[in-house]
Amino acid sequence: LWPLRTSTHGLPPSALSNTNRVCGARSHALCIHTGRVDSQITHACVCMLHVALHSFFSTTQPICHTGRVDSQITHACVCMLHVALHSFFSTTQPICVTVSVMQNAESRSGAGEQEKKEDKKPFALGPLIPARVAWVIMESPAPIGCLIWWLLRDPHADTNWMNWTLFVLFEIHYIHRAFIFPLRMRAGSPMPLNIMFMAWFFCLLNGYLQGRAIAHFNVYDTNEIYSLHTIIGVPLFFWGLFVNIQSDSILLNLRKPGEVKKYRIPTGGMFKYVSAANYFGEIVEWTGFALAAWSLPSTAFALFTFSNIGPRGLSNHADLKRRFKGSYPPERAALIPFIW
């Protein structure tokens, strides 16, 4: 991961440090402040943009062999791993609007997300987009991009059950997230165009990364579908999907029609064990997907997911305990049952 710290890959430490220092003043024109936004998410966007441009405009050079993997896919995965580790183990610096708006409290869970609203007003650029419309636009590049690459798949992917399985799993999650969930969510507050674009951009690049890997570069043995990692990973994915959908339903129904800013303690399902059950479900999903795929792209995305929404789950847990001091279940963990 060390080469990613040089000027030829992603952001050099000096540039990141300078940006952090410049944006220490919230009034500076370059700083787009949304309350809790970290430099690592910005780094992720820059890295992935760099990979996208590198992928489309440079000559492919195979540098890492996992079947058939080219330098661009390898570079994208290493960037995501680097950003995930950097995000989870370094100090948070507010410097730019974040793609974690995909987990925005009001649009994702209505009354369910228990966070301080006074610190979550984003810097708005462009017109405000209705919440449901914005959600569809920003999530849809992932399933559409993966589908496009699948339609252009290599012959080996067409005849292997593993590639078909991974494609179906990815599409199941994102078809629900992009087209079904918006129909169930409350209208919510309109979303600024710049925030919607950041989430759209991330989904576009991740759809490219996962879709291209599944359709072209993940080469499996004929009997890989019966391997231990697949037998464990696929059921784990579906259990995480169930927990995620069930938890979202609980959060969506916490607030009665017409209620505004009424907070309640979520109960039922995995909320018996953790405060951020919806995030826990999504982390389990992509962990199962990574186990089943047994590849660098899927592992990078699973770790990136954990590093992105894990800290938000911890924040939600702390806020719930603050709001319901004395009445919040003391045995309930933040993100991982009985552990954390």
Image (spheres, grey):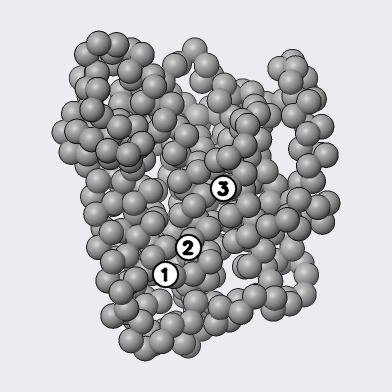
Mark 1 highlights which residue?
293
Which three-letter amino acid code belongs to the residue tagged 3? Ala
In front: 62, or 143? 62
Which three-letter amino acid code belongs to the residue tagged 2? Ser
The CA span between labels 1 and 3 is: 19 Å
Query: Residue 52: where, in percent of width, then height?
Result: 68, 59
Label 3, secondary structure: give it: helix
Mark 3 highlights which residue?
84
Mark 2 highlights which residue?
298
Give me the residue at 36% from left, 36% from top.
340
Which mark identifies residue 301?
A: none
In front: 295, or 195? 295
Query: Residue 196: where, in percent of width, then height?
Result: 54, 37
> How many residues crowd mark 1 within 10 Å: few (<14), some (14–19), many (20+)?
many
Mark 3 in CB contact with mark 2 (< 8 angstroms): no
Label 1, secondary structure: give it: helix
The CA span between labels 1 and 2 is: 6 Å
Mark 1 in CB contact with mark 2 (< 8 angstroms): yes
Query: Residue 174: where, in percent of width, then height?
Result: 39, 54
> Up-down: is 59 above or below 188?
below
Query: Residue 178: where, in percent of width, then height?
Result: 39, 48
Tag 2 or tag 3, which sits nearer the N-term?
Answer: 3
Give me the residue at 28% from left, 66% from top.
232
Give me the residue at 82% from left, 56% from top.
8
The CA span between labels 3 and 2 is: 13 Å
> Up-down: is 267 above or below 102?
above
Tag 2 or tag 1, which sits nearer the N-term?
Answer: 1
Q: Quadrant of residue 94?
A: top right
